[in-house]
């Protein structure tokens, strides 16, 4: 049996400044439902819109399981803090800071996110990371 030859992934488009990655049309991002976004570096972000319309983006890799599943997490609230629970082992992370509320030693990187020209865009680099 011969394995199929690997195919090149399509280039991920970015805005001219190279910082913002178009994720999806704004009207397609449903409240409390996540979307996985492929970043130019090959990493992934999990993008969310809460019921109040606020946008959040975190790393998509669950640090406890190593699986790319955070975009499938359960969005909720813990004492006023918007959260997402990993669908794997159910650890809960702050959508604002990425800190795991069940184990504060663990955190997900956050990404800046914005709506621009009818599309939701995610920063190619984690928040706080400079070039």
Image (cartoon, rainbow, N blue to C red):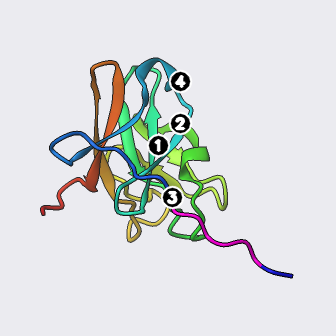
**Residue receiving disc 2:** 76
Q: Quadrant of the C terminus?
A: bottom left
Q: Is residue 92 visible?
A: yes
Closer to the chain start, of discs 2 and 1, is 2
Closer to the chain start, of discs 3 and 4, is 3
**Residue receiving disc 3:** 9
- Can you tell which quarter of the image residue 98 is in? bottom left
Magenta span? 3-8
C-alpha span from label 3 to label 1: 32 Å
**Residue receiving disc 4:** 30
Closer to the chain start, of discs 3 and 2, is 3
Give coordinates of residue 127: x percent, y percent: 22, 53
Q: Which mark is residue 107?
A: none
The residue positioned 57% from the left and 60% from the top of the image is 68
Closer to the chain start, of discs 4 and 2, is 4
Q: Quadrant of the N terminus?
A: bottom right
Give coordinates of residue 77: x percent, y percent: 49, 36
Marks 1 and 4 in Cβ contact (< 8 Å): no
Closer to the camera: disc 3 or disc 1?
3
C-alpha span from label 2 to label 1: 5 Å
Within-10-Å neighbours for mark 1: few <14, some 14–19, many 20+: many
The residue positioned 65% from the left and 62% from the top of the image is 89
Label 3 secondary element: loop
Front in this rendered view, residue 22 or 125: 22
Q: Is residue 73 above or below residue 67?
A: above
Closer to the chain start, of discs 1 and 4, is 4
The residue positioned 45% from the left and 28% from the top of the image is 50
C-alpha span from label 4 to label 2: 14 Å
Marks 2 and 1 in Cβ contact (< 8 Å): yes
Front in this rendered view, residue 16 or 96: 16
**Residue receiving disc 1:** 83
């Amino acid at each position: 049996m011969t394995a199929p030859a690997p195919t090149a992934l399509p280039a991920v488009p970015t805005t001219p400044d190279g910082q913002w990655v178009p994720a999806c049309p704004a009207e397609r991002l449903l409240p409390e439902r996540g979307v996985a976004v492929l970043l130019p570096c090959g990493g992934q972000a999990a993008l969310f819109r809460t019921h109040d319309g606020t946008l959040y983006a975190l790393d998509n890799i669950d640090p406890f399981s190593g699986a790319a599943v955070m975009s499938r997490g359960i969005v909720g609230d813990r004492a006023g803090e918007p959260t997402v629970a990993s669908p794997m082992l159910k650890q809960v992370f702050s959508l604002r800071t990425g800190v795991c509320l069940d184990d504060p030693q663990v955190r997900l990187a956050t990404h800046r996110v914005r709506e621009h020209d009818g599309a939701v865009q995610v920063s190619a680099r984690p928040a706080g990371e400079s070039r």
